[in-house]
């Protein structure tokens, strides 16, 4: 009987929550609910039959991305979403008996990619109030450590790590590939991209799924030292990005006005949501991303069910009891969701339970 490798057969499948058609307001996947740039749509409409019939070259897009990031094309690999970049990194550097270190709570696919390579995940819990655990991270590094992933800002907490703390981890593990996942960089503004090529074990992942509103196109960037990127470049398919993504990349990069307006909208919505939650007695953590993590305690499941009936989807975090992650949408969407949360929290039954 044909059997897969044990490390694959033991994998837990990732189930996306996007299949329920009754939900018309999805604030559970950190997508850009405003949409992509009008220039991207115009470029899509301009594609002709011949262009779509041909395999698309990746190299012109990598040159554009490198110029935008201020690095060299040979330090840049375009990937099918940031997920592919993370997978490629694990496939390039992890083997059986190797270890990967992550800070928890974390994006669940990190462990999936690690396990599929036959390696072991070492989980370092975040510090008080989800702060970056610098000293425990340093203590977790061993000769078996081959990959370290730092999400900055973190998903699902939104809490950011400091530059010097990240640099200490990178310098402490020269034998390991250190991936800085900057999926939410646009909302935070702090990066180590200026260290690309200077630190040979540093890799940075970016995505166009968040601030650029291109989650459906699946465009990511993996940046790193030329010598290392040249190795990783051997793994993916030569045509891993589709023609629509590559054709629209230039317009997405060029339209800074749309991106800036969206980021400003998110920052304002983020602050407003935090104030609303505080007024309701709900704890949330300071976020540098396009979402808020809030603690609804024992009311978590009832709130999710109530909002589900109203067509609203938020993201439960089973790894953080009582916590719900709320994506920041448009002002109108946030008014709708905060109104629904307020109505729930102020209902007589809930009010009695949460009263001091």
Image (spheres, rainbow, N blue to C red):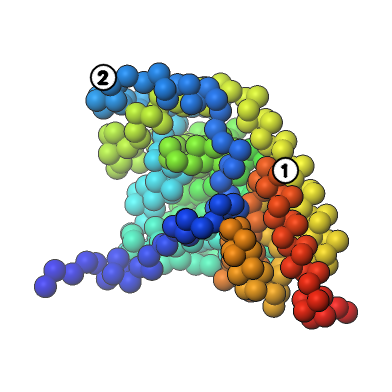
Q: Residue 210 occupies which quadrant of the picture?
A: top right
Q: What percent of the width, then of the height, locates residue 93?
A: 37, 52
Q: How far across and how far down the image is residue 246, in percent? A: 40, 27
Front position in the image: 247 or 306:
306
Q: Which residue is under mark 1?
A: 331
Residue displayed at 58% across by 23% down: 255
In the figure, residue 322 lies in which quadrant?
A: bottom right
Label 1's element? helix
| Count of marks, rendered view | 2
Query: Which is more toward the observer, 291 or 63?
Result: 291
Q: In the figure, is residue 322 to the left or right of 213?
A: right
236 up-or-down from 130: above or below: above
Residue 195: x percent and y percent?
58, 35
In the image, residue 190 lies at what x, y percent?
A: 67, 39
Confirm whether residue 100 shows in the render.
Answer: no
Quarter of the image that includes the N terminus:
bottom left
């Amino acid at each position: 009987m044909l059997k897969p490798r044990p490390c694959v057969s033991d994998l837990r499948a990732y189930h996306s929550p996007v299949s329920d058609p009754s939900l018309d307001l999805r604030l559970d996947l950190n997508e850009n609910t405003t949409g992509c740039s009008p220039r991207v749509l115009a470029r899509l409409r301009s594609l002709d039959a011949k262009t779509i019939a041909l395999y698309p070259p990746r190299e012109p897009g990598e040159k554009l991305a490198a110029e935008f990031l201020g690095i060299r094309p040979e330090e840049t690999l375009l990937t099918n979403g940031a997920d592919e970049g993370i997978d490629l990194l694990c496939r390039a550097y992890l083997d059986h008996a190797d270890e990967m270190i992550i800070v928890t709570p974390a994006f669940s696919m990190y462990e999936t990619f690690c396990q599929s390579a036959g390696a072991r995940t070492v989980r370092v819990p975040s510090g008080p109030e989800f702060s970056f655990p610098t000293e425990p991270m340093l203590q977790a590094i061993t000769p078996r450590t081959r990959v370290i992933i730092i999400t900055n800002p973190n998903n699902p907490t939104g809490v950011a790590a400091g530059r010097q703390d990240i640099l200490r981890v990178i310098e402490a593990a020269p034998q390991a590939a250190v991936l800085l996942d900057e999926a939410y960089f646009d909302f935070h503004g702090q990066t180590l991209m200026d260290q690309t090529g200077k630190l040979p074990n540093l890799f940075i992942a970016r995505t166009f799924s968040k601030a650029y509103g291109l989650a459906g196109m699946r465009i990511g960037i993996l940046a790193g030292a030329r010598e290392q990127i040249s190795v990783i470049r051997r793994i993916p398919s030569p045509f891993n990005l589709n023609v629509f993504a590559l054709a629209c990349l230039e317009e997405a990069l060029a339209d800074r006005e749309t991106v800036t307006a969206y980021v400003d909208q998110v920052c304002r919505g983020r602050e407003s949501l935090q104030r609303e939650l505080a007024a309701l007695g709900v704890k949330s953590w300071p976020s540098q991303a396009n979402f808020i993590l809030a603690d609804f305690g024992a009311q978590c499941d009832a709130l999710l069910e109530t909002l589900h009936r109203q067509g609203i989807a938020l993201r439960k975090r089973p790894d953080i009891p009582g916590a719900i992650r709320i994506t920041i949408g448009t002002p109108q969407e946030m008014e709708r969701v905060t109104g629904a949360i307020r109505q729930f929290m102020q209902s007589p039954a809930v009010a009695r339970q949460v009263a001091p």
